Amino acid sequence: MIILGVDPGLTRCGVGVIEAGGRRLSFVHVDVVRSDPSQSQDLRLLKIWRGLSEKIDHFAPDVVSIEQVFAQHNVNTVLGTAQVAGLAMTAAAQRSIPVAVHTPSEVKLAVTGNGTAQKIQVERMVARILHLNKLPQPPDAADALAQAICHALHPAGELQGGERDQHLTAAQRQWAVAVQKSRNTSSKMRGRGM
Amino acid sequence: MIILGVDPGLTRCGVGVIEAGGRRLSFVHVDVVRSDPSQSQDLRLLKIWRGLSEKIDHFAPDVVSIEQVFAQHNVNTVLGTAQVAGLAMTAAAQRSIPVAVHTPSEVKLAVTGNGTAQKIQVERMVARILHLNKLPQPPDAADALAQAICHALHPAGELQGGERDQHLTAAQRQWAVAVQKSRNTSSKMRGRGM
């Protein structure tokens, strides 16, 4: 199964592609789709739209996994980030490719075992899991690979309530409880920002 | 000149089209592109993307004018609204059609003379300006027509600083000062929400 992970951003949008055969994960591709901050918003979005569409067409993933954007997170950039996430969803849906969404905490938890891990810890674990000889390049695309890894290890992350629990092994249920806990923490953090 | 106004929304996205010959404005079309709230986000965005793309292809506007989305405005729906605004921008840019953005206050000010006008006042003025025999239907698409009217009357609204001032008549400069005042008020309101 080919998983294309997206770390949405208007200036730099990370794209990471892995192949998952059971628990065995292999690195396929990592890159950043960029737009020029001096251009107008519509031209920047078009640039990202075209870049994401090309990546999806080239790698023909079985699923596109996108980092969840929160309304209260980094108010200066959140609208552009949300718009890029929306473009990634639309580009996938246009090709009838399923879309998954995982929160940053879920991704960190899945990759490092710690939902509040530092960026460098995530990068190191991404390199270890994918058997890379060095940290993934460019460094800020590691989050897109981490997003894809998270989906490979815990595809049920985006399913809701009872529907999810029916399909989980004991270990996956344990993980789901930890995710739920980290989501509750995020909600509280968002609550404080309102 | 054909102007296509967009009132972005994920459940209901207003589209209003007018023809502007100088100060003479004529009604062309008004509609709402809908998505089903019970569907997943990616399928909803795809539905809106296709609906907006069809409208733009059909009416071939000279400009697409979109309501400005603010990060602090209605936190429950802002991400979906921003994503739809992003799709409208991308669809326009894909066809090399210029994009304009006007704030709700600018639109109310341009249409009614009052930047804090009520919805019904905006609807009545839209009907009067476009010589409609009744209020625009569906009612919540009136904002899309108002957006298009705002752009027709004050196309310089989205230009910045000195670039704008060079092109303004005395009356437009007066209007620009009022817009700036309403923008500052909006900023303060956003500041309170943080």
Image (cartoon, coloured by chain):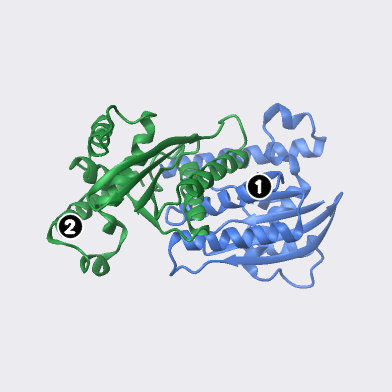
Chain colours: A green, B blue
In the image, is residue A178 above or below residue A27? below
Q: Amino acid at mark 2?
A: Gln
- As drawn, is A60 to the left or to the right of B122? left
Residue A39 x %, y %: 61, 33
Q: Is residue B189 above or below residue A169?
A: above
The percent coordinates of residue B64 (x first, y second) are 70, 50
Chain under callout 2: A
How crowded pointer 1 is (Cα within 10 Å; few <14, some 14-19, many 20+) is rated as some
Mark 1: amino acid = Gln
Q: Label 1 to label 2, Cα distance in Å?
A: 43 Å
Residue under the point 33% across and 45% down: A147
Q: How many marks?
A: 2
Q: In terms of secondary structure, where does tag 2 sit?
A: helix
Q: Which residue is mark 2?
A: A172
Give the image location of residue B66, x and y in percent: 64, 50
Q: Residue at 75% across / 30% down in the picture?
A: B165
Contact flag, marks 1 and 2 (Cβ < 8 Å): no
- Look at the picture and state if A41 lies above or below B8: above
What residue lies at 74% left-to-right and 39% top-to-bottom? B156
- Report whether A187 appears left or right of A100: left
Give the percent coordinates (x, y) of residue A17.
38, 43
Q: Residue at x 69, y 64 (%)?
A: B123
Q: Quadrant of residue A156?
A: bottom left
Q: Which residue is mark 1?
A: B94
Judged left or right of residue B5, residue B167 is: right
